[in-house]
Amino acid sequence: MAMAVPELRSLLYRAPFTKFLLTLWVFSFVGEACKDVTFYVPSTLEADKIIGRVSLKECLSSADGIMPSDPDFRVLDDGSVYPTRAVVLSDEKRSFTVQLSDSKMRKQKEITVILERQKEVLTKRHTNETVLRRAKRRWAPIPCSMQENSLGPFPLFLQQVQSDSAQKYNIFYSISGRGVDQEPLNLFFIERDTGNLYCTRPVDREEYDVFDLIAYASTADGYSADLPLPLPIKVEDENDNYPLFTEAIYNFEVPESSRLGTVVGTVCATDKDEPDTMHTRLKYSILEQSPPSPGLFSVHPDTGVITTVSHYMDREVVDKYKLILKVQDMNGQFFGLISTSTCIITVQDSNDNAPTFRQNAYETSVEENTYNVEILRIPVDDKDMVNSANWKANFTILKGNENGWFKITTDPATNEGVLCVVKPLDYEENRQVTLEIGVNNEAPFIRDVASRIPTMNRAMVTVQVRDQNEGPECKPREQIVRIKENSAIGSKINGYKAYDPETKNSNGLRYKKLQDPKDWVSIEEVSGSLTISKILDREIMAPRNDLYNITVMAIDQEGRSCTGTLAVNIEDMNDNAPEIIQDDIVICKPRMGYTDISAVDPDEPIHGPPFQFALASSSPEVNRIWTLNQVNDTAARLSYQKTVDVQIYSIPVTVTDRAGQSATKILRVNLCDCTHPSQCLLRSRRAGITLGKWAILAILLGIALLFSVLLTLVCGVVTAQKGKHFPEDLAQQNLIISNTEAPGDDRVCSANGFTTHTANNSSQGFCGTMGSGMRNGGQETIEMMKGHQTLDSCRVAGHHHTLDSCRGGHTETDNCRYTYSEWHSFTQPRLGEKLHAYNQNEDHIPSQDYVLTYSYEGRGSPAGSVGCCSEKQEEEGLDFLNNLEPKFLTLAETCTKR
């Protein structure tokens, strides 16, 4: 057929004889029968065992679809026939058809395959006839289609489904699938007895393009006479959708200098109808262009690509075009559906217009000696887009500015050329300057324009220089003068010379010194000559060979001035003797047999090396042991005899420069037994370590302190041997600690031989000789021993003190210590009385400050301080120190707080 089936149906859909032609087409598509093929097989066929081979190419050479009608068999591409399961042939013959199809050529053919064996009797089930009749097999998928948007009448008959089993049984038909029991529901139904398939309403192909139904054939008691039959129903497309552009308005840009065939952009349209049919074959075209002439653009009918068809676009004439685009389906046929869209094409600027001067010649003036001033603005015209690189101008001075007097720039706001003077002009030298100015754009010209017009427009500018009364001129700016080093004070030399540009001489000018770093010279006001005021020393300059600059100002009678630099070249004199660099030298014997010494001279080389080295010692022994040999112009080698002793030698060496200046230096040479000089240097440092006066004083003070401690201990022992007695008030016979601020164990000895212990610079306890203070839960535990006895409990100011065995060490017995019973019998009653008294106020009423924190005793307590047990030692009540025995006076003075 010349046209595709869907296209034919679309064209003929509304014609009166549509149904008739459609019927003819469907029947023409039904496959033709090819030659039957017969295979002789046993009664039982095994699964997947080849039965035979059918020649498919002889029936349909280009078959791309092979479908056997019997699901118990399958046919491969080479024609091989296999059972899909074990099959028992109950009849003498069994046949099925192989349906071949060519989708491209739209052809179908059938091959009947016959399996023969000995005839057998069939088992009947609800047979309608006693005699079996052979009929053409219908239980196979039959191509079926329906037109979308069908006008009816509904229900619309589609086709009849029949089963071969209907010849033997009463068969009932049913269907399932989308359109029946799935959405859209109840679109199709089948007559139960006849197998006629109907559609109940129109269908939109864009929503449902195919319905895959399943047909069933069964007897009244539910026996399935045949396998379920796939029944696809294709919905044939109708051209019921307009093609639509993807955008309502397209915007493209194209340079104005584009050549023919330049791609501007691509438009695109879509169609919801069936793809690859005439309904979706689109054609593009341009309906209208605005401005209408000339026609500059075209669109490819198939791809939608817009290109240029002319190179005469001029943005300066038309900068934007509007196209009305059309798209039509049915391959652009007159009966196709049409849609339109708008395309805006903006022409981009290209540099096709050169900037031009408004005049060919300009004239301006400037006063001499002025610079960094604007003297002229030069406007230009350019038709290209304003503020683009094609419009912005670049100005260049082509001629007349060889001395760099002028500079021309572009004003970005006005695009004018701004001519400025950057170096002062001299009226006496140049009264008029002629400049040639050129202008072009920042962007280069396009190729076509560059070949037609000159690349640079030119204009002439005449600059008149106006005369003014000038001040003095300091030319050259730097003038050099030579002065010998160490010249006599008061010597006169030539100074800086300036001149008046009008008179070309120095008459009437006055000079002033502005800067003289070392104040070496003074300047005469009228003549400008220099007078040396201090001795010039070249060696103190840094760098030494640099020029010494003096800044001078020249002033005329009107007060105008100029400044210049007088560069003084100080000529060197031989006023410095050479000097040996080394001071201390270490020579490892016998590893090193010599050492090299070198000298330097701050004078210029003409007064410097070569140097002469010599031993300056008059001692015969030095001259015998040591020898000095020249190495080069600035160094000599000091050697020694191998038999000399290892020690330190002092060797005087004289060095003389080429002009006769000499100096002598005593070298300290350490002849050492070592392998490397660093070893001797380390020994020297160790041997050189001596005690200073402050270290000696610290040692003496330490010894004195040690003697005072020993004296205190001796005094305590002697006093204890004289007798044991307890004073009435222990607190008044104890020595007060002196300025102990750090935490630790502080011990002082009382007048009766007891040791007083102070913890945290606050509380004192009477526990004899005490070991280390031990803090337990915030309480102070103080240990006391007399022999091997310990004091278990001793409460002082609310604190519990225990005495252990002096913490891991042997405790020596002391005569000034008391037994536990003696200490206990004396302290218990007295402490009880004092505590009872301290617990009452002046009216003998129990006080509220009896039990207080260790570090806080309250305020207003009548008991006051508990003496040695208080946190803070009272300053009063120290008069008892004046009544101590003479042997304790020294200790008292040491322990008393000063």
Image (cartoon, helix red, strand yellow):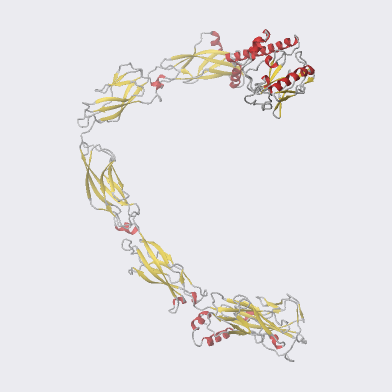
Residues 777 and 258: in front is 777
Image quarter in which the C terminus is found: top right
Position in image of residue 542 (x %, y %): 41, 25
Position in image of residue 251 (x %, y %): 41, 64
- Residue 258 makes an appearance in the image: no
Position in image of residue 375 (x %, y %): 25, 44
424 over 876 or under it: above or below: below
Position in image of residue 740 (x %, y %): 63, 20
- Residue 735 makes an appearance in the image: yes
Name which residue lies at 57% across and 16% down.
670
Q: Quadrant of residue 726?
A: top right
Q: Is residue 630 left or right of residue 565?
A: right
Q: Quadrant of residue 732?
A: top right
178 over 640 or under it: above or below: below
Q: Is residue 251 left or right of residue 427?
A: right
Q: Is residue 184 left or right of residue 747?
A: left
Q: How many marks?
A: 0
Residues 428 and 573: in front is 428
Name which residue lies at 73% across and 91% down.
129
Q: Is residue 325 left or right of residue 586?
A: left
Residues 374 and 478: in front is 374
Q: Quadrant of residue 132?
A: bottom right
857 over 247 or under it: above or below: above
